[in-house]
Image (spheres, helix red, strand yellow):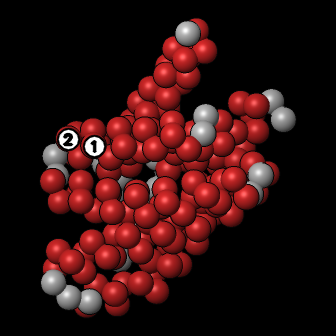
Amino acid sequence: MKRQAKRLCETALLAAVGLGIFVLEAQLPPLTAVPGIKPGLANCVTLAALYLLGCREAAGVLAVRILLGAVYTGSPVSLLYSAAGGLACYLVMAPLSRVFPSRQLWIVSVFGALAHNAGQLAAAAVLLGGGAVLAYAPALILGALAAGTFTGLASQAAVRRIRKE
């Protein structure tokens, strides 16, 4: 029972940290003129949860962050975009986390960032009723490569430090 309680506390703590980072990041001014390009710093927490706790707990961390993030930022539309991007990202990162060791976590992050942007573009295409948003894809791909690498390296360092590798 103690082990389950510890795991629940670790999951809740990571969800709270992820939510805090998400809310702080939402307050930052846009990095570029292209909508949707953000560092994705809260994804560091999801990545760390994947490698430290496992897929189920990481899914819980992500779900809490997305749902409460939409509540705190006050935008129902952002819930749809976050959910579409987060789900796509998770569906790519979870199986890849079993293939790539923690010393290559940054690779998982890059693929996750690309999937996140693809999920958000798909949601935008559905919401806006057309594929015109796909014109943003090249810029979003470049942004995903940069942000995914950065957040992946940060997560990789955090996981290594937490595990004391």
98 and 61: which one is in front?
98
In the rendered view, would you say 54 is above or below 90? above
Q: Residue at x 32, y 57 (%)?
A: 82
Mark 1 crowdedness (10 Å alpha carbons): few <14, some 14-19, many ≥20: some
Whether the residues at callouts 1 and 2 have beta carbons within 8 Å, the answer is: yes
Instruction: Kindly give the residue lying farthest to the right in the view shown.
Output: 165
Image side of residue 130 versus residue 16, left or right? left
Q: Which label sits in the foreground, 1 or 2? A: 1
Q: Residue at x 24, y 59 (%)?
A: 80
Q: Is residue 25 visible?
A: yes
Q: Is residue 45 visible?
A: no
In the drawing, what numbered circle is on residue 67? 1
Which residue is disc 2 drawn over? 71
Q: Position of residue 61 (x, y in %)?
A: 44, 38
Q: Residue at x 80, y 30 (%)?
A: 164
The quadrant of the picture occupied by the C terminus is top right
